[in-house]
Amino acid sequence: MPNGLNLMKLLYRGEKLDDEFLPDYVQRMSHNNGFLDVRRFKKALTKYYKVWAGGRPHRLRYQAVSRVSLELILERNIPHDEYQRFYNRKRGEWRNEPGLCRSCWDAKQYFRFYWWLRGYEQCHIHHEKLIYREVSCSDGRKAVSSSLIHLIVMKYSGADLCQKKIIDELDRSIFDQKIVSGIREYFEFDRNVLAASEVILRGIATGKLIGKRADEKLQIIARLLSRYVANKDFWLRILVLAVLARDRGLYLALPLSEIGREVIETCRYIICTDPKVGCLLEKIKDFKEFRQMEDISLQEFMCDDLILPGHIIIRIKWSLFTCRNMLIQSGRDHVNISPIWDHLPKIIDLSVNREF
């Protein structure tokens, strides 16, 4: 090994913890090994890596260089975490500086990653207000309520892969809110939809959908809407089309992410196992232009107790038009799976009665 490698020896060799971001771990290693400034420690790690690599160029990110160097020095693996996801979307639901629970710190001195969350203001273990070195001024509004953040952290903070599970659940909650808010905007002409959406958004904010699969959430939302107006099948079709729609349909501008892809795949399967939508898609699968949709009737798709204005009907048609090629790709590939549509009434009733 190159001679320069023996210049870096660390007395403190503590392990990175599951609920600790990599940069916070690097800072802890820096402080506990007597470095006056974490930047000096990072420079030393970078120098160590360059000596180890023999001066060869690399494309590793700055944080990755620190991680690899520490792995070499400590002779153990440092697991990847969710810091990059946090960094890429830092504004909004994340603070510029983390808070600190004094009792947690006294028990074990390291920064828990959820202390960075903008809405996490009180420790879920000790019920103490977090203290801050300075007033946080992160741009943007909180995307998720403080109460929901606390419920999510409380549920997953002790679990394996807690960082991924907490951030995934936050992403799912934001996604759920955007779906319901989007439907509310499109159907604001009906006061029953407005009332139903308020109930659903309140349920999301109080954690009623935490831990549920994408299909379960869509079913619960559809059922709750149907309690106020129309029927659950209609609303499930609308929700699915809204998720799948492009800019001229029931477009919701949903974020592209791992969670988004998860919901989209669920919606693709649901729409392709719905017999009524399947018949419509079969009729239009060879259409080349939207004007061919003019003569397509949505009568079987609609419900009698919700009169839709013309512009909403056009958006529904646009959504169907953009989904016209999904039928064979998704629906018929799952020949061994009984259509989800056959099981919806029982699943929805159980879910709604239990959670809302």
Image: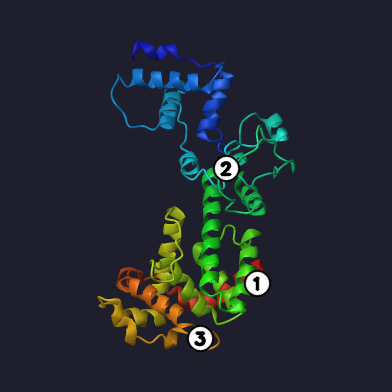
Residue shown at the point (38%, 87%) measured from the top left = 297
Q: Which residue is mark 2?
A: 138
Provide residue 209's location: percent of width, then percent of height: 59, 61
Q: Residues within 10 Å of mark 1 (few under 14, many from 20)?
A: few
Q: Name the kind of residue labelled 2 in the image.
A: Ser
Q: Which residue is mark 3?
A: 303
Local SS, label 2 = loop
- Distance of mark 3 from mark 2, alpha carbons? 45 Å
**Does any portion of residue 167 appear in the rendered image?**
yes
Q: Which mark is residue 313?
A: none
Provide residue 225's location: percent of width, then percent of height: 58, 75
Q: Name the kind of residue labelled 1 in the image.
A: Asn
Q: Name the kind of residue labelled 3 in the image.
A: Cys
Local SS, label 3 = loop
First in sequence: mark 3 vs mark 2: 2
Pick the quarter of the image with the C terminus: bottom right
Left of 138 or right of it: where is 330? left
Q: Is residue 5 above or below residue 211?
A: above
Q: Which residue is mark 1?
A: 353
Which quarter of the figure has residue 313?
bottom left
Local SS, label 1 = helix
